[in-house]
Image: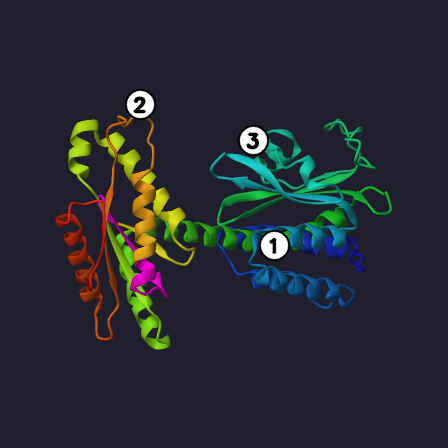
């Protein structure tokens, strides 16, 4: 618990800066801005230097907590410690569901609330989130708030909204002061001071997560969930450079679904899509975790296999071919007398091969497999 006790003058000074702090949060200011505002508000108050130091250290810890679960627990534990709360929870807004979800707790098992989804405006958390108004309750029974749950020892609690860039992020709740006394205005002010940099950290983590999702979406084919051709073109350059730097083998498999146009014309594009997805799943399960499995375009796939020579690449290709030949589709979708197959061309990076030459060699091997009757594997050197 924070050892600094703020007097009435200190509280008024801090409360006077909240409009500026919240405006800065809406504008996405750096966490250091909040520390600076608090420092100026308490200038000359030696007793409050600890608060400024704690804000600074907390901001640094938040900046280094990149893993979401660690960040969430740091927020709950630190603020609960500073205001002496034995129980605390952090609920964050989920854009996908339009609900708030509890992501971290203190003083009670998170399993009790992990399935809880709170609509904005509903209950204490939903109300604080929607109104953006901090809440201090001295006695829930006397103020006719929600009935106290058995896990709470007192009827006093606080709820602090978290928002940045004009976007609601969540709500922090704090309950059960260690001395079993009601929370005070000073406790709420301290919680709000610590929540200011928290909001920016959560916003930063949220934007980083969305950026990762967008980057993943840009690299993945939506139908098959394999990497797309753009990603393949980036990785093949990288893998060729790495193979040459460390003297490693590099194999490329180019795979084409046999007679796919005829299958599409006969059974329709929806069934064709199901066949491609089944093939993609088989490819993914048949290669190593570090192999680069891509949809090259249409019914064609490509697999980069770092560290594989011709013999091992052909062995992998043959395993994939057999698994697809033996795959049994739903008879309501694909008639039992139709068995989709693939042809595979395999090439191994030569000493002087460019990207284009490696792909061309694998393509020539694929054409040879087609010419040999389809449903087979050919190595470029053959």
Callout 2–callout 3 Cβ contact below 8 Å = no
Residue 103, percent from left and from top: 61, 43
Queried whether the magenta region covers residue 304, the answer comes back as: yes
Where's the C terminus, which quadrant?
bottom left
Q: Which residue is mark 2?
A: 332
Q: Residue at x 31, y 62 (%)?
A: 311
Q: Secondary structure at mark 3?
A: loop
Q: Foreground mark, 1 or 3?
A: 1
Q: Nearer the viewer, mark 2 or mark 3?
A: 2
Residue 35 seen by the camera? no
Q: Which residue is mark 1?
A: 71
Name above or below for residue 17 compared with residue 168.
Answer: below
Magenta stretch contains residue 57 = no
Magenta span: 296-313
Foreground: 111 or 206?
Answer: 111
Which comes sooner in the sequence, label 2 or label 3?
A: 3
């Amino acid at each position: 618990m924070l050892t600094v006790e703020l007097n009435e003058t200190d509280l008024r000074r801090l409360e006077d800066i909240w409009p500026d702090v919240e405006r800065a949060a809406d504008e996405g200011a750096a966490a250091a801005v909040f520390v600076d505002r608090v420092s100026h508000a308490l200038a000359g108050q030696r007793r409050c230097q600890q608060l400024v130091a704690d804000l600074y250290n907390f901001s640094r810890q938040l900046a280094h907590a990149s893993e979401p679960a660690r960040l969430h627990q740091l927020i709950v534990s630190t603020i609960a410690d500073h205001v002496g709360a034995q129980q605390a929870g952090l609920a964050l807004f989920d854009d996908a569901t339009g609900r708030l979800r509890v992501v971290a707790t203190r003083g009670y098992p998170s399993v009790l609330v992990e399935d809880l989804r709170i609509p904005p405006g509903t209950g204490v958390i939903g109300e604080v989130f929607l109104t953006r108004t901090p809440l201090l309750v001295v006695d829930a029974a006397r103020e006719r708030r929600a009935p106290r749950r058995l896990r709470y020892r007192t009827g006093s609690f606080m709820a602090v909204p978290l928002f940045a860039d004009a976007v609601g992020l969540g709500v922090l709740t704090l309950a059960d002061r260690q001395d079993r006394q009601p929370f005070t205005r000073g406790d709420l002010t301290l919680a709000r001071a610590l929540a200011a940099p928290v909001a920016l950290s959560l916003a930063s983590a949220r934007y980083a997560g969305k950026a990762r999702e967008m980057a993943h979406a840009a690299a993945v084919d939506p139908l098959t969930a394999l990497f797309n051709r753009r990603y393949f073109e980036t990785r093949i350059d990288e893998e060729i450079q790495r193979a040459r730097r460390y003297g490693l083998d590099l194999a490329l498999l180019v795979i084409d679904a046999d007679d796919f146009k005829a299958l599409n014309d006969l059974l329709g594009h929806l069934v064709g899509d199901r066949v491609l997805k089944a093939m993609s799943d088989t490819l993914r399960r048949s290669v190593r975790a570090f192999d680069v499995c891509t949809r090259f375009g249409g019914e064609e796939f490509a697999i980069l296999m770092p560290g594989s020579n011709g013999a091992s690449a052909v062995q992998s290709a043959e395993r994939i071919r057999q698994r697809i030949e033996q795959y049994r589709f739903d008879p309501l979708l694909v008639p039992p007398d139709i068995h989709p197959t693939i042809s595979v061309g395999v090439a191994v990076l030569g000493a002087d091969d460019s990207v284009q030459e490696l792909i061309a060699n694998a393509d020539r091997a694929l054409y040879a497999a087609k010419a040999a009757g389809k449903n087979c594997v050919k190595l470029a050197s053959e």
